[in-house]
Amino acid sequence: MIQHDITIQKPHSKNSIWLIALFMLIAAVGLLYVKWWPYYNKSLLAASTHSIGPSILGDLSDVTFSWHAALDYTLVYFNSVWKAAILGILLGSLLQVLLPTQWLLRLLGKTSFGSTAIAGMAAVPGMMCTCCAAPVAVGLRKKQVSVGAALAFWIGNPMINPATLIFMGFVLSWKFTLLRLLMGLILTFGVSYFANKLVKNPQAVEVEQMIAEIRPEGHFFGRWLKSLGTMILYIVPAYVISVLLLGLGRVWLFPQLSVSASNSLMAIILFAITGMLFVIPTAAEIPIIQTFMSLGLGGGPAAALLVTLPAVSLPSLIMVAKSFPRKVIFFVMTSVVVVGIVSGLIGMMLF
């Protein structure tokens, strides 16, 4: 049996406090540049023009199946998210070497609702799309954070994004905004919490007993490069390829519907599944819904897209697939579709 060299560390030691403060500073500076300042300007645009730009899907009347169209979508998508994607990978790797394991476990290691709630609230200032938040969720799981807490952070970033809710109020309506907030809270805190129940041997309930941790081997910079390199090799190729394939299948995922089908139950189910699989940048669901509704799409399918488009996507699910049990991944996918359908049924009555 291998004996690990362990050291007992005080969770509130000066060294730990400095490491936590350094991580928070890096995160704040990165988010200020990538998210907070640009979104402040975009909120002014939304208030004055009732729009935040054109739909990323482009010309919806173009139903041509081509690799050229797929490449165009891929380039447009990554042009929108590359800064946030880099920040997500950076934070996901730094989290593994800067944040003390004991500190994270005390906050987020339990399967209680408290850990899930803390992680969900921590997601609010992130305001990342599901793919850009995925590397941070992967980093959290590598630090043995509970399934529910890691999911709450991952799903909470896109679903209870305050900037998106503000844009939505200006561009769509307050009804859409309230519906999105309600469903976002259900997914972030409810679905994430119940996902803990699917884990056979959940993270130790008595986290206070876990006061010993393995002493890191090697220099900080070397450990960070290893963490960063592993994350890039695992995440980036699958990310790019899956986005390209979704761009290729866009003409099938978003078909043109007849007038009679534009607000039907079948349309709600179709767009709930499509939204769960498709990948978009932060807040891109707003111009997509705005464009679809201008072309005659009913409130039901639009409300389904409102929830499922930002919540998860095929690329983000692939990114986190090795960090969560398979049954948890399928539970999240199914839950997003079901919540999307419920949202669509409510949308049929409201819009």
Image: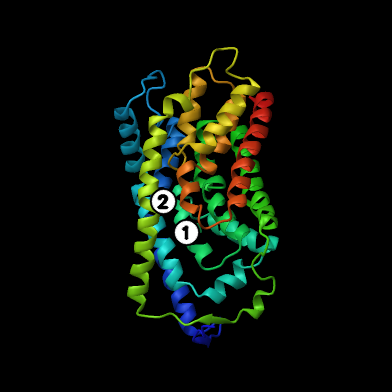
Res 173 seen here: no
Q: Residues within 10 Å of mark 2 (few under 14, many from 20)?
A: many
Indicate whether 262 appears above or below 103: above
Q: Which residue is mark 1?
A: 136
Res 298 seen here: yes
Q: Which residue is mark 2?
A: 35
- At x 51% / y 87%, what residue is drawn? 7
Residue 88 shown left or right of residue 168 in the figure = left
Query: Quadrant of residue 29 in the image?
Result: bottom left
- At x 66% / y 53%, what residue is drawn? 195
Q: Secondary structure at mark 2?
A: helix
Q: Do the residues bearing badges 1 and 2 touch, measured as CB atoms within 8 Å?
A: no
Q: Nearer the viewer, residue 160 or 6?
A: 6
Query: Quadrant of residue 25 in the image?
Result: bottom left
Quadrant containing the C terminus is top right
Give the image location of residue 346, x and y in percent.
68, 30
Q: Residues within 10 Å of mark 1 (few under 14, many from 20)?
A: many
